[in-house]
Image: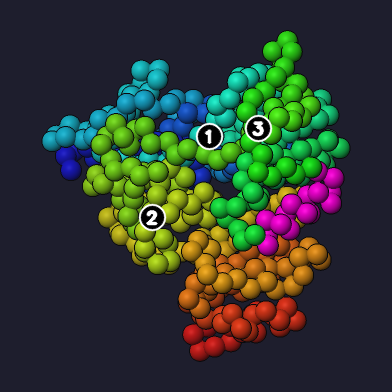
Amino acid sequence: MTHAQREAGTLVVGASQAGVQLVASLRQLGDTAPITLVGAEAHPPYQRPPLSKEFLAGTTTQDGLAFRTPSFYADHDIDLVCGERVVDVALPAGERPGVARTSSGRELPFARLALTVGARPRRLDVPGADLDGILYLRDLDDAIALRDRLTEASRVVVVGGGFIGLEAVAAARAKGKDVVVVEAADRLVGRAVAPVVSDFLREAHERRGSTVLLSTGVVGFRGADGHVEEVELADGRSLPADLVMVGIGVVPRTELAEQLGLECDGGIVVDAHARTSAPSVVAAGDCTVLPHPLTGEGRVRLESVPSAVAQATLAAATLAGREAHARSVPWFWSNQGDLKLQIAGLSTGFDEHVVRGNPDTESFSVLYYRRGALLAVDAVNAPADYLAVRKALTHDIPLPAELVADAGTPLKTLLATPAA
């Protein structure tokens, strides 16, 4: 690396959870080269998970979302650039450092590059989708707008029965709103949980007063004076609405990676060390697809804080020349009012599942297996089961399916093996 490149330091594009973790980890590893962290939003880096939970419910303020104190970045010699979207990147070549250009024309030189650019909401492309009152929830400005609109709304339609949608449902219902969920698939959260959990979530939200419509697509919106008033469904029905929240998934931001010629396949392809197909570039967070964190097989995309933190930590080690190896168990959570769902592991490809407890009590867990090997757990208001399975997966301790069905036997007692 030339003197000019050393002076250029590290550029991290994306002031996300992964971006903040990456720059903090670089400093923790003793890296003293200049660091620039650039984000497209005007706000300093903040936590996203509370946006659909505590922030929407009004129990967390905007100040409470900040990752770090305002002085953290200056104290650690990190140049934080907010409100600048990077639109063009050229990698280092020969004696010349790389350079990134923002939409305002600003140039940011670098020797090492990290992409932590996240994902954008998937848009609903139907007639009337541009009417006022149809909102998405991905960033802080989205959450502020949705929270403010909820104050005035009375009839809320949530399009999409995934975790974000159901969290918004709980927040709206807590404010006394009439809420309808419209899900195109035949069950809620179908990509993430077994049918027994999908059925439980539907019944639990209906018990609390929401209406859940499954196997129902949205084909358009109608309104007056530019504001939404009706949601048109594929079966010919229409739903009255003065506020619509659309949560139908996200699309990884791969534009810069594609411009650089990096391999992309449903996200920026990285290896177990967060390296992209270009030796000088790493990537982390929702924008990536990576090998399964436990088996190393295939490619998965993980939309979660723990995954972003673990991957960004590895990316920092890679940039610092200290390649790290870590067995990382994916884990997730979804707070839907008084329903607390915790997930450890990845259940994809399961061929057997065991239900512990009775879903009717709203405290139970589902353990997933493939060919007898434990894959994951979904725990609803059952934190002890979640913690036990997470420990079992972390330390590769077997929890045989035939032993876990008795909810009267704490799972932690089954972990008392030499392997533990």
Residue beneath the point at 34% across and 33% down: 256
Q: Is residue 207 magenta?
A: yes
The residue at the far left in this view is 94
Q: Which of 155 and 409 is in front in this view?
A: 155
Q: Which of 93 and 388 is in front in this view?
A: 388
Taken as a whole, is the magenta stretch helix, strand or loop? Answer: helix
Residue beneath the point at 32% across and 37% down: 257
Q: In this view, does 412 lie above or below 38?
A: below
- Circle 2 SS class: loop
Q: CA gap, disc 1 to disc 3?
A: 19 Å
- The residue pinned by badge 3 equals 234
Amino acid type, callout 1: Arg
Q: Is residue 361 visible?
A: yes
- The residue pinned by badge 2 equals 299
Q: In this view, does 338 lie above or below 396?
A: above
In this picture, residue 343 sits left or right of residue 167: left
Q: Earlier in the sequence, mark 1 or mark 2?
A: 1
In this picture, residue 274 sits left or right of residue 124: left
Q: CA gap, disc 1 to disc 2?
A: 21 Å
Q: Is residue 258 magenta?
A: no
**Which portion, as a residue range, is magenta?**
196-210
- The residue pinned by badge 1 equals 122
- Circle 3 SS class: loop
Looking at the picture, how far across and down is residue 217, in whole percent? 63, 36
Residue 144's quadrant in the figure?
top right
Query: For the residues carrying marks 1 and 3, which lies nearer the camera in this image?
Result: 3
Amino acid type, callout 3: Ala
Q: Can residue 112 be seen in this view?
A: no
Amino acid type, callout 2: Arg
